[in-house]
Image (cartoon, rainbow, N blue to C red):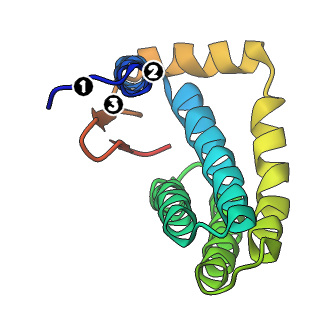
């Protein structure tokens, strides 16, 4: 594929940069990026609704659904079963709301999903740096605890978060 437009070149550069960062990222950083991806895609879907762009809306919602499903699929209940269960319920709620959003031309189901998701992202963002460094240190000591393989073709991480 030959890229000639400057905006396409910039998009490809950003994609390569993100791929490189994710290939060496720790679980905290990967999860934070996935959370941000959900917010970005749902914001873009709301913009598409406002413009009446059905194709863009569908694409952005589907992308957000894939990220949320991945977050749900990689929950590890072995450390905190109740938290994992509650997160799975929230992710299911979000997926249900986004399924509604694919049918409706209203931002309300997206807003409902974002409202449910916001406390999770805020809690993640408020994790102190000292706790992140401690977790990273423990992971290095026990390399088998978390292993991920970033697949740039699928734009998803394989592993448990």
Q: Where is mark 1, residue-wise?
A: 3
Dot 1 and dot 3 residues touching (CB under 8 Å): no
C-alpha separation, residue under disc 1 versus residue under disc 3: 40 Å
Mark toward the viewer: 1 or 3: 1
Ranked by sequence position, the earlier of labels 3 and 2 is: 2
The vertical placement of 126 against 42, above or below, is: above
Q: Residue at x 51, y 69 (%)?
A: 58
Which element carries disc 3, helix, strand or loop? loop
Please provide percent x and percent y for residue 1: 14, 32
C-alpha separation, residue under disc 3 versus residue under disc 2: 16 Å
Q: Where is mark 2, residue-wise?
A: 25
Which element carries disc 1, helix, strand or loop? loop
C-alpha separation, residue under disc 2 versus residue under disc 1: 28 Å
Which element carries disc 2, helix, strand or loop? loop
Q: Residue at x 68, y 73 (%)?
A: 89
Please provide percent x and percent y for residue 25: 45, 21
Q: Quadrant of residue 95?
A: bottom right
The vertical placement of 103 against 14, above or below, is: below
Residue 78 tag number: none
Q: Is residue 125 left or right of residue 64?
A: right
Ranked by sequence position, the earlier of labels 2 and 1 is: 1
Please provide percent x and percent y for residue 87: 68, 62
In terms of depth relative to the viewer, which is nearer, 37 or 84?
37
The vertical placement of 122 against 12, above or below, is: below
Considering every residue shown, the one lying at the far front of the view is: 5
Q: Residue at x 58, y 48 (%)?
A: 79
In terms of depth relative to the viewer, which is nearer, 56 or 113?
56
Q: Where is mark 3, residue-wise?
A: 144
Q: Is residue 99 left or right of residue 109?
A: left
In terms of depth relative to the viewer, which is nearer, 32 or 134?
32
Please provide percent x and percent y for residue 134: 65, 16
């Amino acid at each position: 594929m030959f890229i000639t437009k400057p905006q396409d070149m910039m998009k490809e550069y950003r994609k390569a940069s993100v791929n490189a960062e994710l290939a060496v990222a720790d679980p905290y950083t990967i999860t934070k990026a996935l959370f941000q991806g959900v917010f970005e895609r749902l914001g873009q879907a709301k913009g598409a609704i406002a413009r009446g762009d059905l194709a863009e809306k569908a694409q952005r919602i589907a992308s957000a659904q894939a990220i949320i499903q991945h977050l749900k699929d990689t929950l590890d209940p072995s450390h905190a079963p109740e938290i994992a269960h509650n997160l799975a319920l929230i992710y299911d709620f979000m997926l249900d709301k986004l399924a509604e959003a694919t049918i409706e031309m209203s931002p309300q189901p997206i807003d409902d999903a974002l409202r449910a998701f916001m406390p999770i992202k805020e809690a993640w963002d408020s994790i102190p740096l000292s706790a992140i460094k401690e977790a990273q240190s423990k992971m290095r000591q026990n390399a088998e605890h978390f292993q991920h393989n970033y697949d740039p073709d699928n734009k998803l991480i394989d592993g448990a978060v």
